[in-house]
Amino acid sequence: MVNSMDPVHIEQTANATLVALEATLGIQDARVLHERLGSLLTAAKSVVVDGSRVERLDAAILQVLAGFARSAHERGLALSWHSPSPVLQQAVHVLGLESILGMTS
């Protein structure tokens, strides 16, 4: 079954690319999320990820986010987080991904 909901909404502004994550992100969303974020690696100068809506996410999504963050860092792309939800923060902490994702407090 194909998920008809887009797991991420991307908006370009003059200063940054805004990436808003959906509330529920499962393994079925990983491929689309990977493709959408990957397209930003050459097009964007800075990326702000809004994780405020995240209520549930799979480890596969965190793998995609970690891979994107690492690739962004390697390319000198600024990556920041806007209001990561408690669920997102807890998942990142449990898997020890704070420094990779740049979510250190």
Image (tube, grey):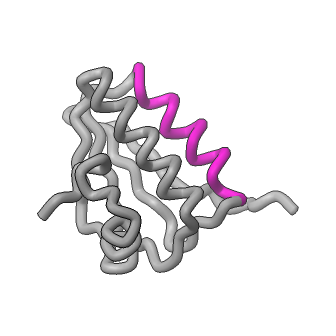
Residue 24: image quadrant is bottom right
Apparent side of residue 3 relative to residue 66 in the rendered image (left or right): right
User: Looking at the image, which is closer to me, 99 or 65?
Assistant: 99
Question: Which residue sits at x=31%, y=21%?
Answer: 75
Q: Quadrant of residue 34?
A: top right
Quadrant location, the N terminus: bottom right
How many numbered discs, if any? 0
**Is residue 32 highlighted in magenta?**
yes
Q: Looking at the image, which is closer to me, 60 or 43? A: 60
Q: Is residue 24 above or below residue 100?
A: below
> Percent from the top left, x then y, of residue 27?
67, 60
In this view, the residue farthest toward the right is 1
Q: Residue at x 45, y 60 (%)?
A: 21
95 is higher (above) or lower (below) than 102: below
Q: Position of residue 51 (x, y in %)?
A: 36, 64
Residue 79 locus on image (x, y percent): 25, 41
**From what the image shows, is residue 95 above or below residue 14?**
below
Residue in the picture at 51% in, 65% down: 22
Task: Answer whether residue 43 is magenta in the image.
Answer: no
Q: Is residue 4 left or right of residue 99?
A: right
Q: Residue furthest left?
A: 105
Position of the C terminus by quadrant: bottom left
> Residue 90 occupies which quadrant of the picture?
bottom left
Magenta segment main secondary structure: helix
Expressed as whole percent of the image width and height from the top left, the position of residue 4 reads 74, 60
Q: Magenta segment, which residues?
A: 28-42
Residue at 34% x, 31% y is: 72
